[in-house]
Amino acid sequence: HTTCTTKNEDSYSVSIMGLLRIITSTPLLLFPFLFNGFTCEAQDVSAQCDVVINEKNCDQSRCEELCGLYGTSFLIDKGKCCSHIGKSATLLAFEEAELWVPRIEEFNRCTGSSVKITYLEEGEDGMAEALIRDVGDPDNPDSGEGIYDAYIVQAPWLPAVESGLASLNDRIKENDDYINYQDINPASRDAISWNGTVKALPLDTDYIAIGWREDVFKKHGLPLIPPRTVEELVEISEKLNGLDHNDDGEPDWGFCLTPQVNYFYSFVAPIFQTSLRQCDDANDKTCSNGRKTGQNLFFDSDTFEPLIFNEGFRLALKLYWRLIRSSNCQTQIPAGEKCSRKTAFPTGRCAGVVSMPGTLTKMIKEGEKYSIKPRVNITTNKTIWHPGQNLESGSYWGRRARMPGSKQVIKWNSGGEKKDQKLLALVDCEENINNCPHAENGVNYSPFFSEGGESYALNGKQSKPISRDLMFDLFTWMSELPITKLPMAGQYRKSHLFAEQSDVLQDAGWPEVMINDLFAVLDVYFLAEEDGGHPVQDLLLLGFADYMGALDTELHDKLLLGAIENGGLLNTTNVSQSIDPENKADSEFFDSRYDTFINTLASKYNNITSRISGGQLKQLERWRQSLNLVWKPPTELCTNVLVLKDYTAFDRLNCLSVVDIETLCLTKKEYVEGYNEGLCGSYAMNLNQIGSYRWVGFGLAFIVIILAICCAVWTYIYRNSHVIRASQPPFLLWFCLGVIIMSTAIFPLSIDDSFASQRGCNIACMASPWLFFPGFAVIFSALFSKIWRVNRLLDGASNFKRIKVTMLDVIWPFVIILVLNLCLLLGWNFGDPLVWIRVERDDVNSYGICAAKGNVWIVFVVLLTAVNIGAMVLACVQAYKARAVDDALSESKYIGLAMMSMLEMAIIGIPMMIILKDNPSAKFAVAIGAITIICISLLLLIFVPKRYLSKQNPSNRRSLGRSVVAHRPSMAMSTDSTGGRRQSMTMGSEMSNEYNAPHCRGTLDTLHNTQEEYIPEPTIEEPVSVSPNSAEYKLRVLADQILELKKLLQEKE
């Protein structure tokens, strides 16, 4: 065959036979003229001449006529008429179809383009290699010939080249009014998507179904319904085997097939694909999605172990073998022929067939390529038999049905903690979530979408953008075409099941029964998973051809169709005498040969995987990606394998070179030791971890927390007592809360990589400052606000001012300091957080520390320290001002003692922690000791004196009034009935009331009442010696005079 183009502007499409016809009818003198305009270039990969039509065939005056064919609108709506004049592109196809030439001619006439199609000489078998050769190897960005702009592909070929194919997402979105992508059946869409990126446009679908002959079933007295299960399929095939189906007096066969791995996996699918895989919650609806839980028919998604070592695979093989023995193979193989459904079905000797949809249609539709041929009397040329002659009018002999299901399924969660395939149980299918969530009347159906059907992809590496645009316009237009006008396509859309499509098929000569059967099959096959669909994908993985080639060789060539004398199961001279696994006499032979088959296949799979780029572990990643699973890094995948205790898979995946054994010894020591006892010995002795000291830290933290809670409870219980009221209970409670928060910093300090994962240690590193600094801020902000309130009240009284100081008036410093802490901690957390790292001290020692990646953290630490020291200094300043106030009102003395304690801890602790930085246990002990001492000392110094004061007799509490009067000379004084002096002051929760200094406004009654309101207990009976020249003495005299004046006024009244 040749590719023929002209040197001038005109170009034509011709074939060799057409050229010969021209030559034979042309005078010899015209030969030079005929060939003057042609050049013929031989093409190895072309199976027919390319269709090349230039711009002269594009006529803008005929756009409606040329671009609106078959009811399509894309080319007209988008203004594509004559839009591609002078542009060319080439499409590579693997199979010739008669509809390609007219469709490309029509597109070229409309757009003015020059689109050519080239057929691959090797056909479907060579397309995967041809794609890699043209697109390029994904591991070699410079590879790829880049001859073609677009390709007709099948899903299993895409993994090897998907990175070099153009993404179609944006193109589909832009043209979805015409493509209607969601109308394409879900299984076809899933097959060509990688991580949400569409790499090809599906315009076909392939699946496994069965054809059954109603005339044969009726003739032999079987119910006129298709088999429901694969077991029934085999039993019916065996029952019909040996009976005469076409009235020729010869024994015929059961169901026919071509032994291929895709048909074998249609037996495996309903046994494997129950969709209950590795689910933590059986009530979770996501459990019904087998892909998301990491399983399919081929490889385990955790270990990449082939799913062949289980009873389900064995059951499927035994049923498949029984079907082969009752099929056309029993006659064709002994005769030296290929066992083929395509040659067997036209003879009329098949009771049914297992096939792909396109070929199945050509078998059961009369007049098609593989349909049954009527038997004709050679002498009279009259038909003496034809299929369906025993059926009534309105019936049809060629029926279609979905692939039968199975009543027995694998219970995937029965393999133990190791997920051992050999322990997986075969159980009866139940119509519930436990075994068969998609069961119908106790049967699990799982349609197998073999290879995925034909799709159209663009070269994303070497092809020019204008060529890609041109080809996608062709694809978009084709997606609008009626199914009968589309090359190499069967029904692939949900809309193809609408009533109007039935009319299209009737016009194409389909019997109504055939149409109804087709729609009934596709109604269930095209269901989305969320609507109850249960499709099963083919092996969409790099190395597909190698894996399936190995299975085909071992399963068919060596085991099922291999001669008994060569280790197979087949008696090549008399198939009925082949090894039968159901026969007890043959069971031992079958078991031995089956085990050989399984082990050899596993070895071949292992070798194939090892040869593929990236090896076993990379292939596991690709397989999970193909199943649309959540991505996991190699270290996590290997850790999961270790936890499953699948040590064989751990070695096969070469996980030892990927994981950090030292870290695993810290977090998964039990599993590491199970893999290799003693492997963790060299690590456990030299990691310098906190170890059992952490429990001491936990204990001290709980002691502090319990003590703080007890103080808070005591404060609440005695909140109405004189001492507690004077000490302002809300601030005391906040003080206790701050102590609790600061003490909990001990907990994250106790965490290291012997107790938590890397992520857990990272969290603990930042948790410590998040607890220590806010706790410290709450403590000293509460003390500052508390004492500041007292000082403000006393200052007001000393200046004879009427003031009101509520808690809200003094709370704002507390809020500001706390907010500053939180803001700085957030900045630290997001700017340069502490993370857990392990530092190697020498060859045999290492230690873990919390460290930041940069130096920004120092800024945050300095600012946090400054803010909190500022809070502490403010509290100390207020305490100094209130140094002479009674202990019930101010804790100045005890705050000073606490400051001394903290200073001592800082002077001793900080240098020690620096010195001991490479000794985690010692550094930990210093840190928790410092926090514990600070917290306990604060609690004891604040609450023990209050407990002591609360135990005193109220009549003996003299220091309160004395100290107030001594340092606040403006305090009100009065003379009681005994002639002594009385000085009083009220503090506590009523400080929110107004504090009134004595003043001269109003009547004496009002003055006295005001004085009495703010001068309750404690009362001091004895007089106090005061200098006559002091302001205090003058205040007392004035108070006495006011009282005397009041008394005289009362007597006069």
Image: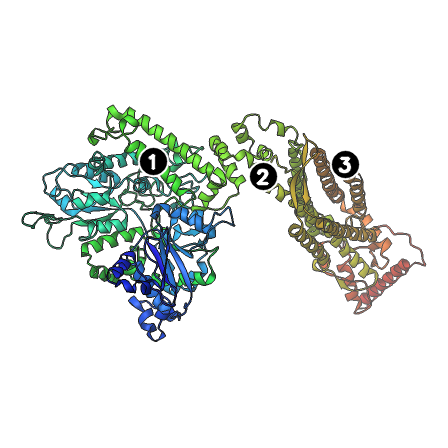
Report how far apart the C-alphas of labels 3 and 1 lie in the structure. 70 Å
Foreground disc of the pair 3, 1? 1
How far from the left and from the top, in percent, is residue 690?
A: 66, 33
N-terminal of the pair, mark 3 or mark 1, is 1
> Mark 1 touching mark 2, by CB under 8 A?
no
Say which amino acid is labelled 2: Ser
Say which amino acid is labelled 1: Thr
Is 65 on the left-hand or right-hand side of 254? Answer: right
How far from the left and from the top, in percent, is residue 800?
A: 82, 63
Give the labeled residue for mark 1: 553
> Mark 3 touching mark 2, by CB under 8 A?
no
N-terminal of the pair, mark 1 or mark 2, is 1
Q: Quadrant of residue 146?
A: bottom left
Give the labeled residue for mark 2: 757
Please identify the residue farthest to the front as the structure is shown: 29
Of residue 528 and residue 366, the one placed in the foreground of this image is: 366
